[in-house]
């Protein structure tokens, strides 16, 4: 290597084909020639030629960066984050024409409309969120193969994903249907519905940290579906339907027997009756019909059956008799009854597991991987962890059972009676303090002080 220049040292032995350095050709003169190998800095490549451009890294290795035809204008060792970064430089230099782009658009309907995260992943990645009407448009999309997805905590979307092949035109009408997920959470529309122990429940505004609106006395934890709240009221033998803001009681659906819990099943609401141990279904076809369906499933419990969870395409109904009944969501049929030997008054579903009063159960094999929890109120699942209220504070367990932490500091001796979550923050009900305590679901750290303003908050089943 003696006598070689620095540039020669970088380029020597790097070519599998000789560099092609003709004058830059016009569009009409493009050919289909393919150049492989590594080209010296400053080489001019015919427009339209397929080029595998490689940059030398500091460790001496080579890294593929782009697959196009253009002039190498950048300095040695410089890398580009994306194909678009390289194209921008070359277009600005007048070396290549701007790449044509297209759009992918559609809409989200169902349980939620606004602020759903839309991602188009593949050749490159594009992101946006839906507007107030559920509509979205991803612009500037280059040709390629992609996968379109919709995500928002607390909801599932059908289809799960949509394959997209962008060739020469924009794509429209790529639509998703949202369904709210329940199982320990009462979050929706930026609010949590906070039941109480013998008092009037209220809607808690997460953004404002206030309790601006009241519910109906006797109402228990409900579900948020299609921009409305469905709340059971055992005292009135009804399910009450509120708007998303909690400012208006839209309708009251009667015909139940002391309903203690509700959960979402496909396009209907499943209502668990305590008085006669049955599950009845409210038809809810995205806002067009509200009424009781004829289906009524008799469960096997002889005691209170007011605790529920759902996941894996099934609903789970537990009761004081110490068993959990699986209900197949589609079709609406009774499944296996699992005898646990312990009274079930609390249930929380997360990561294919059900947490009951004292045990965690794997819903696939129905083993009890962890025994020894003592729950005083509704647990919740966030950030792949269970948050479990009991007499020692708020126990945090990972998704397979082992305890990670016990939170007591800041609760001021007010043992929690349940919790709900918006996915990032856990809201713990403290009856003695008549308020809620926020906890960061990622770090398990307390956030701010106790938020007061509601009598005897109680996140019940």
Image (spheres, helix red, strand yellow):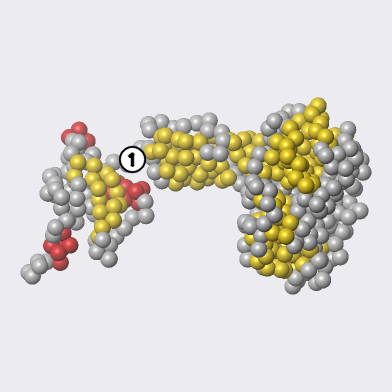
* Location of residue 6 in the rendering, given as x and y in whole percent from the top left corner: 15, 66
At horizontal 92% and vertical 43% (from top left) the residue drawn is: 235
Residue 135 occupies quadrant: top right
From the viewer's perspective, is 153 left or right of 171? right
Mark 1, residues whose alpha carbon is within 10 Å: few (<14), some, or many (≥20)? Answer: few
At horizontal 63% and vertical 66% (from top left) the residue drawn is: 443
Residue nearest the observer in this picture, 259 or 201: 259
Residue projecting furthest to the left: 3
Q: Which residue is mark 1?
A: 99
* Location of residue 112 in the rendering, given as x and y in whole percent from the top left corner: 66, 40
From what the image shows, is residue 430 above or below residue 165? below
Secondary element type, mark 1:
loop
From the viewer's perspective, is 248 left or right of 399? right
- Screen quadrant of the N terminus: bottom left
Residue 140 occupies quadrant: top left
At horizontal 74% and vertical 65% (from top left) the residue drawn is: 394
At horizontal 19% and vertical 53% (from top left) the residue drawn is: 38
């Amino acid at each position: 290597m003696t006598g070689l220049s620095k540039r020669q040292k970088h380029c020597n032995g790097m070519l599998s084909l000789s560099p092609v350095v003709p004058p830059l050709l016009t569009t009409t003169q493009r050919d289909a020639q393919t150049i492989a190998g590594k080209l010296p800095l400053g080489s001019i490549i015919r427009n339209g030629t397929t080029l595998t451009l490689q940059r030398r890294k500091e460790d001496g290795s080579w890294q593929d960066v782009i697959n196009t035809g253009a002039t190498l204008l950048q300095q040695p060792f410089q890398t580009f984050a994306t194909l678009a970064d390289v194209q921008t430089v070359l277009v600005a230099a007048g070396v290549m024409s701007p790449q044509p782009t297209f759009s992918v658009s559609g809409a989200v309907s169902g349980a939620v409309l606004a602020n759903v995260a839309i991602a188009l992943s593949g050749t490159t990645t594009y992101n946006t969120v839906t507007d107030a009407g559920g509509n979205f448009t991803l612009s500037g999309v280059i040709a390629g193969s992609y996968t379109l997805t919709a995500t928002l905590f607390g909801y599932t979307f059908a289809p799960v994903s949509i394959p997209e092949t962008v060739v020469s035109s924009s794509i429209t009408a790529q639509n998703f249907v949202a369904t709210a997920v329940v199982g320990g959470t009462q979050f929706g529309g930026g609010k949590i519905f906070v039941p109480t122990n013998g008092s009037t429940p209220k809607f808690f505004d997460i953004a404002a940290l206030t309790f601006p609106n009241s519910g109906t006395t006797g109402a228990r934890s409900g579900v948020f579906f299609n921009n409305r709240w469905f709340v059971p009221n055992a005292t009135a033998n009804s399910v009450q339907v509120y708007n998303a803001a909690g400012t208006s009681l839209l309708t009251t659906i009667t015909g139940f027997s002391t309903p203690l819990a509700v959960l979402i099943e496909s396009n209907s609401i499943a209502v668990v009756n305590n008085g006669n141990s049955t599950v009845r279904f409210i038809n809810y076809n995205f806002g067009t019909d509200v009424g009781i369906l004829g289906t009524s499933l008799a469960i096997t419990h002889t005691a209170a059956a007011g605790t529920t969870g759902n996941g894996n395409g099934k609903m789970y109904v537990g009761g004081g008799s110490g068993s959990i009944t699986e209900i197949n969501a589609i079709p609406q049929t009774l499944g296996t009854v699992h005898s646990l030997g312990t009274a079930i008054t609390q249930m929380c579903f997360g990561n294919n597991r059900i947490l009951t009063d004292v045990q965690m159960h794997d819903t696939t094999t129905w083993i009890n991987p962890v025994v020894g929890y003592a729950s005083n109120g509704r647990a919740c699942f966030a950030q792949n962890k269970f948050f479990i209220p009991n007499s020692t504070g708020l126990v945090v367990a990972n998704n397979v059972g082992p305890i990670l932490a016990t939170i007591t500091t800041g609760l001021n001796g007010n043992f929690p009676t349940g919790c709900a979550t918006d996915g990032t923050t856990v809201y713990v009900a403290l009856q003695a303090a008549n308020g809620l305590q926020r906890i960061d679901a990622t770090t398990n750290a307390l956030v701010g002080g106790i938020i007061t303003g509601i009598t005897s908050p109680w996140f019940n089943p």
